[in-house]
């Protein structure tokens, strides 16, 4: 619907996922031994980054002692060169690299572009394996198969696949204003779009309406999808929407929302320029910031 909407960060990673190779055990074995194969190590779920600004991916050879013995997750192909990720024990980073807490790096704007998109997909897989070591059906330890894209139970033979939790995040619009709110867990001045998990049996539009009413007490008119962003903290898919309302008064859900405000486009421009003393804009790298930038610049909206 909104052809001019911006592409959120962490999307469209350049690697060819080559999903057809995941079930080919012989091909996977060959790729692990390929001289051009590279592995992105994660220690404590933090990727190895390189460079003076730590914006490069710290790929190592598959026979590097740092990753020898680790389960390799097949990420895809860069040209013809295989790319993997691996969770490793906490260790010192090799010279020229460091293990970075990626969420903070993305939100600060220090880590972005294609490297961040690749690393975020890898992190989501690392997170899934670390939090799902046992069978949900019988409790037995599972084993990694299909290049890391499945875990199999040797006891009850159940197959488990990576999960993604759907989340709606929405910019709410009323008469040339948008609603921004401060979650009770946010820093004192940080305001953003409201968001919430999609519940079983809900479509995206229903979740947008429910969360908007629950958190801000607003009844919505039209709801429209804008864009989405994978968010691997730990493994969500943020589905960005915009919705219109005729309601002005907020009824805040006290357990979730500390404060909410209506802002005009001029207010938002001032906010994004850091000119509102008691408010901070959504952080760089998150889809909330993309939605707000698109709205203030007229790329999305209902008029």
Image: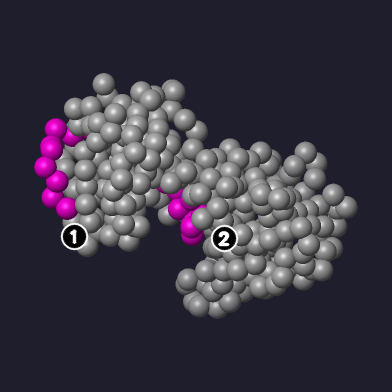
As drawn, 133 above or below 29: below
Residue bearing the label numbered 2 = 101
Residue 68 image position (x, y, % from top left): 79, 68
Density class for disc 1 (Cα within 10 Å; few <14, some 14-19, many ≥20) is few
Q: Earlier in the sequence, mark 1 or mark 2?
A: 2
Horizontal arrangement in the rendering, residue 32 relative to residue 5 (left or right): right
- Say if the magenta span includes residue 207: no
Residue at 55% x, 63% y: name it: 127
Q: Secondary structure at mark 1?
A: loop
Q: Quadrant of the C terminus?
A: top left
For the residue pair 223 and 53, the one nearer the viewer reads as 53
As drawn, 239 above or below 104: above
Density class for disc 2 (Cα within 10 Å; few <14, some 14-19, many ≥20) is some
Q: Visible in this render: residue 233? A: yes
Rounded to the nearest angstrom, the CA distance separating label 1 from label 2 is 31 Å
Residue 256 image position (x, y, % from top left): 25, 58
Q: Visible in this render: residue 85? A: no
Residue at 69% x, 40% y: name it: 16
Residue 297 image position (x, y, % from top left): 38, 25
Residue bearing the label numbered 1 = 254
For the residue pair 208 and 102, the one nearer the viewer reads as 102
Q: Secondary structure at mark 2?
A: loop
- Say if the magenta span includes residue 250: yes
Residue 219, label in figure: none
Residue at 39% x, 36% y: name it: 273
Q: Which residues are magenta?
A: 231-252
Residue at 55% x, 53% y: name it: 105
How many labels sit on residues?
Answer: 2
The quarter of the picture where residue 291 lies is top left
């Amino acid at each position: 619907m909104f052809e001019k909407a911006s592409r959120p960060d962490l999307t469209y990673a350049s690697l060819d996922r080559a999903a057809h190779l995941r079930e080919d055990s012989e091909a996977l074995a060959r790729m692990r031994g390929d001289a051009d194969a590279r592995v992105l190590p994660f220690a404590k779920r933090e990727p190895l980054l390189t460079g003076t600004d730590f914006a490069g991916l710290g790929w190592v050879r598959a026979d590097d002692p740092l990753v020898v013995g680790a389960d390799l997750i097949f990420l895809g192909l860069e040209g013809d060169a295989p790319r993997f990720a691996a969770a490793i024990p906490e260790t010192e980073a090799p010279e020229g690299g460091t293990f970075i807490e990626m969420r903070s790096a993305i939100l600060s704007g220090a880590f972005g572009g294609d490297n961040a998109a690749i690393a975020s997909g890898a992190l989501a897989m690392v997170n899934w394996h670390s939090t799902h070591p046992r069978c949900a059906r019988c409790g037995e330890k599972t084993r990694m198969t299909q290049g890391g894209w499945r875990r199999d139970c040797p006891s009850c033979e159940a197959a488990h696949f990576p999960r993604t939790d759907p989340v709606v995040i929405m910019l709410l619009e009323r008469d040339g204003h948008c609603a921004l709110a401060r979650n009770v867990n946010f820093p004192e001045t940080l305001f953003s779009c409201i968001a919430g998990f999609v519940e079983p049996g809900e479509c995206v539009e229903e979740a947008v309406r429910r969360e908007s009413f629950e958190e801000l007490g607003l009844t919505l008119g039209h709801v429209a999808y804008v864009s989405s962003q994978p968010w691997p903290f730990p493994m969500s898919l943020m589905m960005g929407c915009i919705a219109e309302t005729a309601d002005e008064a907020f009824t805040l859900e006290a357990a979730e929302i500390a404060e909410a405000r209506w802002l005009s486009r001029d207010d938002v421009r001032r906010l994004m320029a850091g000119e509102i003393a008691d408010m901070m804009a959504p952080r760089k790298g998150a889809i909330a910031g993309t939605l707000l930038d698109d709205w203030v610049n007229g790329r999305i909206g209902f008029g």
